[in-house]
Amino acid sequence: MGKTDKRIDAYIAKSADFARPILTHLRKLAHQACPDMQETIKWSFPHFEYQGVVCSMAAFKQHCAFGFWKASLLRDFENKLLAQGETAMGHFGRITSLNDLPPDRQILKYIREACRLNELGLKIVKSKPVVKKALIVPAFFKKELAKHPKARTVFDAFSYSHKKDYVEWITEAKAEATQQKRMATAIEWLSQGKNRNWKYER
């Protein structure tokens, strides 16, 4: 059986007049969708849990919000879910009356689907930001660029990847003679505004 939380009773009771019927209705649907739904308070507003957080609701001065913990994984059956923060905190936009809510059958579908995701143990995978390593330009490279202002201007304006192409091409040369030859070629191409792989571009 599901479990209610007296703190949510208090939360609803102290909400604005317009918000109380909205919150009461959403609470009812949460338990209707999943008889084993549990209630709790997190971050000072009501949450509903079933093998993990399923959804939450909140009341503000002029509107209510209702959102899903794993909204990005939900199948948007009726194309009703809004991006978090698009118009309000939740995924149904700014809810000012019961008329602003999707039909009950749609809300029940979303809640049941959210519960199913928790049953399957699916998690939201957050991609790690790509951190570029600082490009180390050898002293001899900088010295040659200093002798050729035009080449240096082009190099400085290049993207990280274009700069890296030149630096790696020159520094990977094992023989000093090869390195010097490539450096001379790089200065020539840079002076002409060319990137390292200009020959292969169409």
Image (cartoon, rainbow, N blue to C red):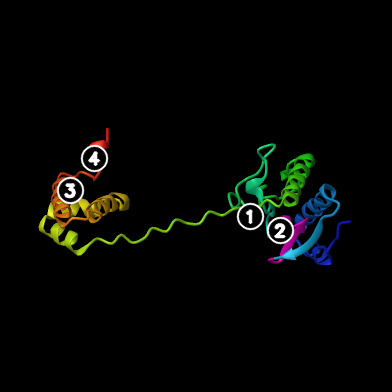
The residue carrying mark 2 is: 58
Mark 4 highlights which residue?
A: 198
Q: Earlier in the sequence, mark 3 or mark 4?
A: 3
Quadrant assignment for the N terminus: bottom right
Q: Please name the residue shown 68% across and 51% down the image.
A: 122
Is 199 placed left or right of 74 in the picture? left
Q: Main secondary structure of the magenta part?
A: strand
Q: Residue 178, how many percent across, how many down?
A: 16, 52
Q: Tag 3: Cα neighbours inside 10 Å, few (<14), some, or many (≥20)?
A: many
List the residue tagged with mark 1. 89
Amino acid type assigned to the residue bearing label 3 in the image:
Leu
At a point 20% along the width and 43% down the height, the residue shown is 194
Query: In the figure, 106 relative to 171: above or below?
Result: above
**Mark 1 secondary-structure assignment:** loop
Residue type at the position of mark 1: Met
Q: How far apart are marks 2 and 1 (CA)?
A: 9 Å
**x and y percentages locating residue 18 in the rendered image:** 76, 54
The span picked out in magenta is 43-55
Q: Hey, what amino acid is under mark 2?
A: Ala
Residue 79 among those drawn in magenta: no
Mark 2 and 1 residues: CB-CB less than 8 Å, in contact? yes
Residue position marked by numbered label 3 in the rendering: 190
Q: Distance between the residues labelled 2 and 3?
A: 59 Å
Point out residue 33 in the picture as x, y percentages from the top left corner: 82, 47
Q: Looking at the figure, which quarter contains the C terminus?
A: top left
